[in-house]
Amino acid sequence: MPDVRPDDSTDVAAPDRSLWHDGDFLRYWAGQGVSQLGASVGRIALPVLAVSVLDATAFQVGLLDAVQFAAFLLIGLPAGAWVDRWRKRRTMIVADVVRALAMLAIPVLGWAGALDFWHLLAVAAVVGTATVFFDVGYQSFVPILVPAGRVADANGKLEATAQVARLGGPGIGGVLLSVISVPVLFVAEAVGYLVSAIALTTVRDRERRPDPPEQASLVGQIRAGLSFVVRHPLIGRITTATGISNFFSTLAATLYPLLVLRELALGAPAFGLVMTMGAVGGVLGATLAARVGDRVGEGTALPLTMLASAVVMALMPLSVAMPTAWSQIAVLCVAEFGFSALVLVYNVLQVSMRQRVCPPVLLGRMNASIRCLVWGVMPIGALLGGWLGGAIGIVPTMVIGVVGAATACLPLFFSPLWGMRRLPC
């Protein structure tokens, strides 16, 4: 596949041009913002529907979380090779349409009185599979859409908007849950995906039709992407740390709805408020990521934010020690706010670096390889969390998750990242 930027001089001159004057990026940005808002409204509905309406057990909640991320483990690697053969924008449009149709199945079944837990598993599997292809295309599309010098700026804007959507989504969902049935919220998620698909059809990009890959076999193409990730001295370390963090964080996060809705009995509106505070922190983290990198060093910021996020996450299981419902909600809000802010600083810095240093021909496979490695462990963590939650209890399992997540910073502390002022371009 040739370089998607036929004129290298464009990448040198274009960074002076603000993204606020780039109509294609603005339309893409707007479409993703609406999609993220719809997904955030629907996201709070899934655990509420499973726990409060369908009376799911801890293991069933773990199974539901596992199904949502299983596709990253099962087809993540070949998806990267396939997406590198396809046009990224077209791939994302198809994935959005598939996700919208799958989400609409839930309210239809709800209105028919036929909704059961296994329907949630089926919808989660379809949406998860489509999301694999969308996410690989999404992370590979930004360097195609904007000049190289604006990649970090574009990622910051997209991540900040995603967090703004998360800010409003859970709150809106929590309020709506008091006046409408849970399945109706999934319509909002479906509409968001459709808006994203429509916006993508209006975007013009400079991606050429991919040439046949150098490696004839699918296995060879996958190996090339994996080899780049594993052998890169910084990306390999970051992938290892992120995978450890995701595994243990998922082990704890799987039981989070059960902690709030069942163990503490705080209700859906409180759950929405807590998630909203997490989005506020995410907005702050995405906005300040560049400044944090300038202040402490971009490389140094990665192990520091990884360790700090685990420390803040410890407040979640500790909330059970609070004497009143309001104090429990306050502790959970602080935990969500701090955790999201730190994770977004980490993500904006390391994702932007990955996109800058990866050859365009390997972008899809690089992103898919990392997604497979760092998200593929999440269904395993979800299943283990659900099983442990039923066996030893919700709070002890979450404590195990917190302690394990704290160890994720070690590959970063003992690496060239520590003390690095600027990540490579």
Image (tube, rainbow, N blue to C red):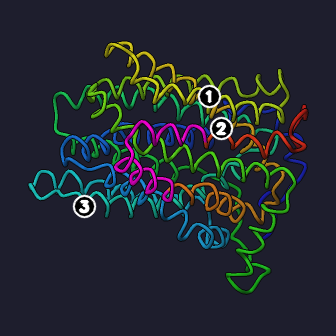
In the picture, measured across the screen, residue 342 lies left or right of residue 238, that is left
Disc 2 and disc 3: Cα gap in Å?
Answer: 36 Å
Disc 3 target residue: 119
Between residue 69 and residue 255, name the one nearer to us: 255
What amino acid type should be assigned to the residue bearing mark 3?
Answer: His
Instruction: State which tag comes first along the sequence, 2 or 1.
Output: 1
What amino acid type should be assigned to the residue bearing mark 2?
Answer: Ala
Label number found at residue 135:
none
Disc 2 and disc 1: Cα gap in Å?
Answer: 7 Å
Task: Verify CB contact (< 8 Å) between mark 2 and mark 1.
Answer: yes
Q: Secondary structure at mark 2?
A: helix
What amino acid type should be assigned to the residue bearing mark 1?
Answer: Val
Relative height, residue 5 to residue 196 (above, below): below
Find the magenta span and give its range: 379-403
State yes or no: residue 314 in magenta. no
Task: Verify CB contact (< 8 Å) between mark 1 and mark 3.
Answer: no
Instruction: State which tag comes first along the sequence, 2 or 3.
Output: 3
Q: Quadrant of the N terminus?
A: bottom right
Q: Secondary structure at mark 3?
A: helix
Q: What's the magenta bit mostly, secondary-structure-wise?
A: helix
Disc 2 target residue: 406
